[in-house]
Image (cartoon, rainbow, N blue to C red):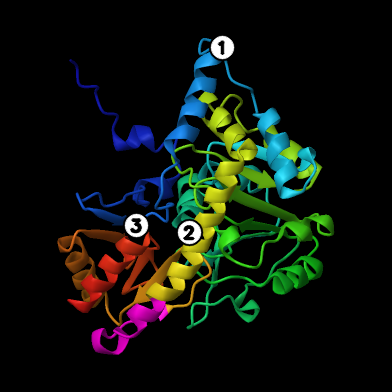
Amino acid sequence: MITAREPNQQFLEQFLTPSLFTTRGYHIDVPDVEVKLDQNESPWDWPDDVKDVVLAKLKKKSWNRYPSAFGDEVAVKIANRVGVDVSNILLGPGSNYLLALVLQTFSKKIKGKVVLARPSFALYENQCQYEGIPYEVWPLNSDLEYDVALLPELPKGSMVVFASPNNPVGNVLRRSVLKSLLSKHPDVLFIGDEAYCEFSNEPYTELLREHANLLLVRTFSKTLGAAGVRLGYVLGGANLIELLRKPRVPFLVNLFSLVAAEEVMDSASMSKIFDDIVLNAVSERSRVAAALGKQSERLKFKVKESQANFLLVRWPSTDLSNAAYHHLIRSGILVRNVSGAKNLEGCLRISIGTGPQNDRLIGAFLAM
């Protein structure tokens, strides 16, 4: 075994943006716990009979051949399900990749500015820092809600990136508000991250019919219970999709992801499972929020109203939230500690699990 020689800083600075050196890379805690409520996944795996069908189909494929370059045959099925033309959709290996692709592609020679919601999905700001893309922040208000009055001035040729429902807060940008923004700023490109849209009542699909300055990014990871499948898609005007298709590297979506996605689209039993995932998240979200709310005064936290499959719990200090985080780990429960992010001091994000998992979470709060 050899150890590769490391290049020095002066060498590296010839090739990389300065902000890449100081930006923190992606990190999650991985303690060994019994209840995992930290990544907003479905609490249920796919049933064995569906897995067997996927594996049987996968076995019949030629593994020595490349998969479909862009997964267009699966894109047709997804487009039909969503209700758009196939020219309005592009697949990729998860929505994270596609969000990065959108930022990279449309910021190269941007005439206006890049505006990112905050607090929101950390990938937006991290990706801009990795790529050396200057940006401004659209801050949520003191109640952690979108406020158009706080939106920075948008010159022509700007791009606004936001999530709805918003991770890790759970708030939404109302469809009527987005419609107004799209009409008011026809020369601004709005990027809506809709990873959790099925948990809320405000999907934006219909806005694509009237507004050419909108791209929507979605994923199979949440309501479709397929985080391990790694598949996402972008929706938008055919010309925007075609432009994104050029820098989107071919053959990125592997055979397993494509075969699993086809089964998702074709299986009636999977449709029932997806409905159950959403129903569980919505009903259990209300139950957990109510139960934690009864402890909020005693434990000095607030539970943020959510339209996603998670809840944000906020303490007045990071010391208090860290103490709660470690108490939950000792109780065998892992949640996401987001208190180190800007404007999220004192916050923990808690994914909604199964009924018994949520009961255990509630019990752990009672024992604090």
Stretch in magenta: 289-303
Question: Does residue 83 sit above or below 285 in this rendering?
Answer: above
Q: Is residue 298 magenta?
A: yes
Instruction: Give residue 294's position: percent from left, percent from top.
Output: 33, 86
Question: Does residue 365 sit above or below 161 in this rendering?
Answer: below
Residue density around tag 3, few if under 14, some if 14–19, many if 20 or more, within 10 Å = many
Picture quarter containing residue 2? top left
Task: Indicate the secondary structure of the residue bearing disc 3.
Answer: loop
Q: Which of marks 2 and 3 is nearer the N terminus?
A: 3
Q: Which residue is rendered at x = 20% and y = 21% of the image?
A: 3
As drawn, is 67 to the left or to the right of 175? left
Instruction: Kindly identify the amino acid type of the residue bearing the numbered disc 1.
Output: Arg
Task: Indicate the secondary structure of the residue bearing disc 1.
Answer: loop
Q: Which residue is at the far left?
A: 330
Q: Earlier in the sequence, mark 1 or mark 3?
A: 3
Residue density around tag 1, few if under 14, some if 14–19, many if 20 or more, within 10 Å = few
* Disc ID at residue 121: 2
Instruction: Kindly identify the amino acid type of the residue bearing the numbered disc 2.
Output: Phe
What secondary structure is the magenta-colored segment mainly?
helix
